Structure formats: C-alpha cells, structure tokens
Amino acid sequence: MISTRWTRRLAPLALALIVGLSPAPARAQEPPPEGTTGESSGRPFDGYFLMGILAFAALFVVGKSARR
C-alpha cells in the first residue's frame, strides 16, 4: 500500500504527465477578411486602464497580506 507521503509527492507528477500527454489540437489563426490592412480597431485605453486597476489590486492584496 502506498503511504500518504508518497501519494502527495507523486500527485503533481501524475497530474503533469496527464496534462502534458493529453492530445491538444493546434488551431491556426484565421486570416483577416479581405480589404483590411491590419489596422487595429477599438479603444486600447480601456484595456490599459483595466490592466492598471488589476495590477494595483494584486499589489494591494500582496501588500496587505505582507503586513500581517
């Protein structure tokens, strides 16, 4: 019988093998529709602003837990 200690050591290895050996299809990116020159559309500021908020929240949580 395998002890709990060995089970805990082998679990990450087994999980990595299962995930690493599972077949995953590689999908190619669809070509852009004809007539487009590759210009980006949308509002990039919104993405940068949201990323800044998320980074601040992550730093806040890390800093808050480090003080304890």
Image: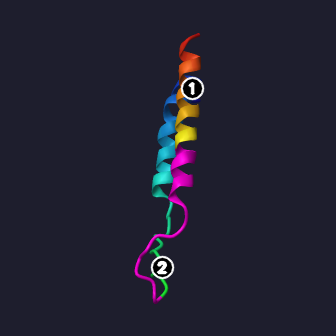
Residue 67 vs 42, above or below: the answer is above
As helix, strand or loop, the secondary structure at mark 1 comes to helix
Task: Using the image, tell me which numbered label, if any, was put on residue 30.
Answer: 2
The mark that comes first in sequence, 2 or 1, is 2
Q: What residue did someone put label 1 on?
A: 60
The image shows residue 33 at horizontal and vertical percentages of: 49, 85
- For this rendering, which residue is in front, 29 or 40? 40
Q: Which image quarter holds the C terminus?
A: top right
Residue 50 vs 9, above or below: the answer is below
Q: Which image quarter holds the N terminus?
A: top right
Closest to the camera, between mark 2 and mark 1, is 1
Judged from this view, the residue extending furthest toward the bottom is 34
- On whether residue 59 falls in the magenta region, the answer is no
Name the residue at 41% across, 76% down.
38
Name the residue at 47% across, 40% down.
13
- For this rendering, which residue is in front, 3 or 25? 25
Type of colouring: rainbow
Question: Label 2 sits on what residue type?
Answer: Glu
The image shows residue 3 at horizontal and vertical percentages of: 57, 25
Task: Using the image, tell me which numbered label, if any, was put on residue 47.
Answer: none
Magenta-colored span: 34-51
Name the residue at 49% across, 30% down.
9
Is residue 38 shown left or right of residue 51?
left
As helix, strand or loop, the secondary structure at mark 2 comes to loop
The image shows residue 44 at horizontal and vertical percentages of: 51, 58
